């Protein structure tokens, strides 16, 4: 009886961020959403949790050798299809960018200017989660020299890195910004990532937060994360640069 009264009200925990700048909701191009229905379902959840803008960031790496022109066309088509649905409970689909993993098997020459950036020539990049034998410094330097601002995705998720690692210090020294995944803060990727994520934020080393939403499993985990009291406190206490995107 009165079960509806017990149902937890969904809080708009992430509203101060305004924008999600990391998700894999362009259907069928990587390990993210597989169709438009799933994309809309995930976007609806993001809106309910407070996000008013979303940037799509499909993978660009050896395993997902996407081409920018194709991705842009797919994005335009998807955006039109979603707009045609005339749903008023969705965030603004703000733009298409990418999550780039440059290593021995996948490179993009910054001179070609083809990479898909977030506003302000900001480029989301990642490292391999498993191999630590590739040194990304030269590639990072090339991009920075061409005026890109590099944002390292989820630094807390690389098992071989922590806040005191030489590579982390070097990245910060070069002016790179970091983006912790909000799901890390609720233990989605394990305790180590949770601790490291909190550490980066509390030391002022995470300018951005991203959802890295791939599908409804992630979106449902986000709902749980939105009710985590420590996460709510972080959103109140710290300022992130998502809202400038
Ligand atoms: Fe990602």
Image (cartoon, rainbow, N blue to C red):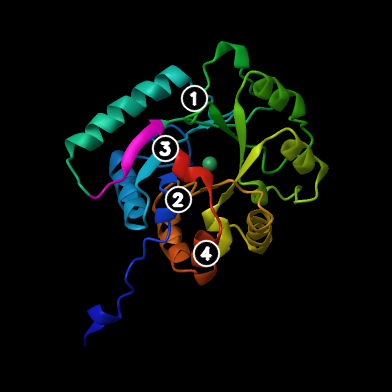
**Which mark is first along the chain, 4 or 1?**
1
Position of 160 with respect to 27 (left or right) is right
Q: Earlier in the sequence, mark 1 or mark 2?
A: 2
Residue assigned mark 2: 17
Q: Secondary structure at mark 2?
A: helix
Q: Which tag is nearer the camera, tag 1 or tag 4?
A: 4
Q: Which stretch is magenta?
A: 89-95
How far, Cα to Cα, is label 1 from label 2? 22 Å
Q: In the image, is 120 to the left or to the right of 166?
A: left
- Answer with the quarter of the image where residue 63 lies: top right
For label 4, the residue is 231
Estimate the spatial distance between the alpha carbons at disc 2 and disc 3, rounded to whole Å: 13 Å
Residue assigned mark 1:
116
Q: Is residue 23 visible?
A: no
* Beta carbon of the mark 1 residue lies under 8 A of ligand 1: no
Percent x, y for residue 153?
60, 41
Which of the two residues, 12 or 41, is positioned nearer the viewer here? 12
Q: Nearer the viewer, residue 100 or 90?
A: 90
Disc number for residue 55: 3
């Amino acid at each position: 009886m009165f079960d509806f009264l017990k149902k937890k009200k969904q809080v708009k925990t992430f509203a101060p961020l305004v924008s999600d700048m990391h998700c894999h909701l362009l259907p069928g191009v990587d390990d993210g959403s597989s169709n438009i229905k799933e994309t809309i379902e995930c976007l609806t959840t993001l809106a309910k949790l407070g996000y008013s803008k979303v940037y799509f960031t499909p993978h660009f790496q050896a395993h997902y050798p996407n081409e920018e022109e194709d991705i842009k066309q797919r994005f335009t088509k998807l955006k039109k299809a979603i707009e045609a649905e005339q749903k008023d409970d969705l965030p603004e689909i703000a733009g298409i960018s990418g999550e780039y993993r440059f290593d021995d098997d996948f490179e993009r020459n910054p001179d070609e200017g083809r990479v898909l950036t977030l506003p302000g020539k900001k480029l989301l990049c990642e490292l391999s989660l498993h191999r630590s034998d590739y040194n990304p410094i030269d590639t990072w330097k090339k991009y920075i020299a061409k005026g890109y601002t590099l944002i390292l995705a989820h630094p807390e998720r690389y098992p071989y890195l922590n806040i005191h690692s030489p590579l982390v210090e070097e990245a910060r020294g070069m002016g790179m910004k970091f983006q912790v995944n909000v799901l890390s803060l609720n233990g989605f990727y394990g305790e180590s990532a949770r601790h490291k994520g909190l550490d980066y934020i509390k030391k002022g080393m995470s300018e951005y937060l991203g959802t890295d939403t791939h599908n409804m499993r992630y979106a449902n985990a986000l709902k749980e994360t939105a009710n985590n009291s420590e996460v709510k406190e972080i959103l109140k206490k710290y300022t992130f640069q998502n809202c400038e995107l």
